[in-house]
Amino acid sequence: MDSLRVMVVDDSSITIKKLTQILEQIGHSVICSCKTGTEALAYYQQYQPDMVTMDITMPDMDGIEATRQIINRFPKALIIMVTSHGQEQMVIESIDIGAKGYILKPIKADKLAEMINQVYEKYKL
């Protein structure tokens, strides 16, 4: 697989830093990061990333609504939800509206790489 241009969306600076490190370690580049769903909409349109990691729980606009709006505007968007244990119903809702997969926190490099590969192989443009 080619190196992907990834947008990281999470309200935690620590999680953004960790995801960025892991993504770069597994051969991808983080082209932008943002902390709210509203920023995610604007940044997605501006950067048109190959893939997005999207936190579910954020202030302003949660990841589910941001995913819904991105997919409405960009139906081929590849979004992987980043979730904590206990958010199963939100993950199901996210998948129903078009997210392509999910990864549980704490994020492990091998699991993230596996999910990215699965999503890319199944949905690549």
Image (cartoon, rainbow, N blue to C red):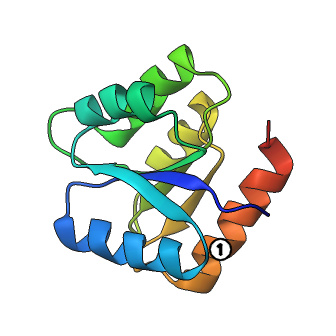
State the image coordinates of residue 87 (x, y, percent, origin top left): 41, 57
Taking depth in this image into account, of 46 and 109 the one nearest to the observer is 46
- Which residue position holds label 1? 113
Taking depth in this image into account, of 94 and 120 the one nearest to the observer is 120
Q: Residue at x 79, y 64 (%)?
A: 1
State the image coordinates of residue 38 (x, y, percent, origin top left): 25, 29
Q: Secondary structure at mark 1?
A: helix
State the image coordinates of residue 117 (x, y, percent, origin top left): 75, 64
Q: Residue at x 78, y 61 (%)?
A: 118
Question: Which quadrant: the C terminus?
Answer: top right
Residue lying at the far right of the rendered structure:
122
Q: Residue at x 47, y 78 (%)?
A: 22
Please state the total of marks drawn on the protein image.
Answer: 1
- 115 shown above or below 4: below
Residue 88 appears in the picture as rendered: no
Q: Residue at x 21, y 48 (%)?
A: 35
